[in-house]
Image (tube, rainbow, N blue to C red):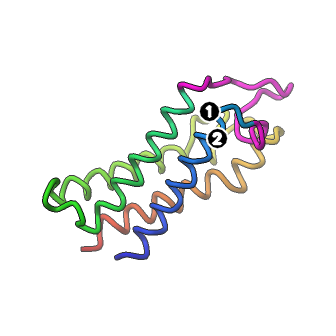
Amino acid sequence: MIFPVLINTSIFIFLSFLHVYWAMGGKKGMSAVLPSFEEGHAVFTPGPLVTFIVAAAMGVFAFITIGNLDIFREYVNLNIFKYATLAIGFIFTLRAIGDFKYIGFFKKATGTLFAKNDTRYYSPLCVVIAFVSFLIFLLD
C-alpha cells in the first residue's frame, strides 16, 4: 500500500513545485506545456494566480494521497481520503481522454510541440496517476 501512495504523492509534489516555479516567473519548459494552435500561438496563457491555484491543487492531491496511509486518523476519517482519491483518479482519467481538440489522447491538434509532448508524456502520466489512484482506492 505504501508504494503506490508514495508514487502518486511524489508526482503531485513535483508537479506542485513545478507550477510554483512557473507562477513565480520561471520560463523553462513553458513553450512545451501549453496547448497551442497550429500557428504556434498558445490557446490560453494562464497568469500567476491560475498557476498558483494549480500548484495548490497538486499539493492538496498530494495531501489526499498520503492521507490514505491513515496518518491523519485523529483528524479525518480514512473514507474521506479513499473517496477523494477515487475522485482524483476520475479527474486524471478525464484529462487523459482530453477535450477532443487540444489535449488528451483523442485530440485533433497533432502538429504542435505540446501535442507531441502530450501524446508522449502528459497523457500517459495522467493514465499512470489515474491507475495508481484507483489501485490505492481498491487496496486496504
Instruction: Please tell me in which quadrant of the rendered image residue 109 appears.
Output: top right
Q: Residue drawn 22% across and 60% down?
A: 72
Query: Which of the 4 image quarters holds residue 23?
Result: top right
Query: Mark 1 Cα within 10 Å, few/some/many (few <14, many 20+)?
Result: many
CA distance for labels 2 and 1: 6 Å
Quadrant that contains the N terminus: bottom left
Amino acid type for the residue under numbered disc 2:
Tyr
Q: How many marks?
A: 2
Please say if the residues under marks 2 and 1 sit with CB atoms less than 8 Å apart: yes
Q: Is residue 36 magenta?
A: yes
Residue that badge 2 annotates: 21
Residue, x 53% and y 62% (percent of image)?
128
Q: Is residue 65 left or right of residue 16?
A: left
Magenta span? 27-49
Q: Residue at x 67, y 24 (%)?
A: 45
- Where's residue 100, x and y in %? 61, 36
**What kind of element bears circle 2?**
helix
